[in-house]
Amino acid sequence: MIVRASVLKYAESSFNYSAGPSARIHPLQALPYAACADCLLRAAGSEPSWTRKVINVGR
């Protein structure tokens, strides 16, 4: 699996993000590092359908 994040920044996270193989994100809208880390944990633990796919994560 490849997790493709939008622009990352240091900020408090509200965990308000979209993630998935067909998630539509705004590529230039910054995403907090904590939200990206949350997506990585979610992908590793509770999303078996994401195996062998590119996962978009962003706002």
Image (cartoon, grey):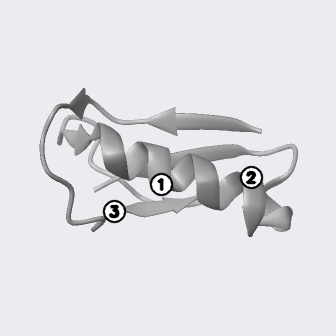
Specify the label residue 38 is tagged with: 1
The residue at 34%/36% (across/down) is 6
Q: Position of residue 51 (x, y in %)?
A: 86, 51
Count of number-bearing discs: 3
Q: Earlier in the sequence, mark 3 or mark 2?
A: 3
Specify the label residue 44 is tagged with: 2
Q: Earlier in the sequence, mark 3 or mark 1?
A: 3
Q: Amino acid at mark 3?
A: Tyr
Question: Please, is residue 17 above or below residue 39 in the view?
Answer: below
Q: Compare residues 57 and 43 and report the one nearer the observer.
A: 43
Residue 47 lies in quadrant: bottom right
User: How far apart are labels 3 and 2 at the CA level?
Assistant: 17 Å
Residue 59 lies in quadrant: bottom left
Q: Amino acid at mark 1?
A: Asp
Q: Position of residue 11 (x, y in %)?
A: 12, 41
Q: Amino acid at mark 2?
A: Ala
For label 1, the crowd category at 10 Å Cα-Cα, with few meaning under 14, some 14 to 19 and many 20 or more, is: some
Q: Earlier in the sequence, mark 2 or mark 1?
A: 1
The residue at 42%/58% (across/down) is 24
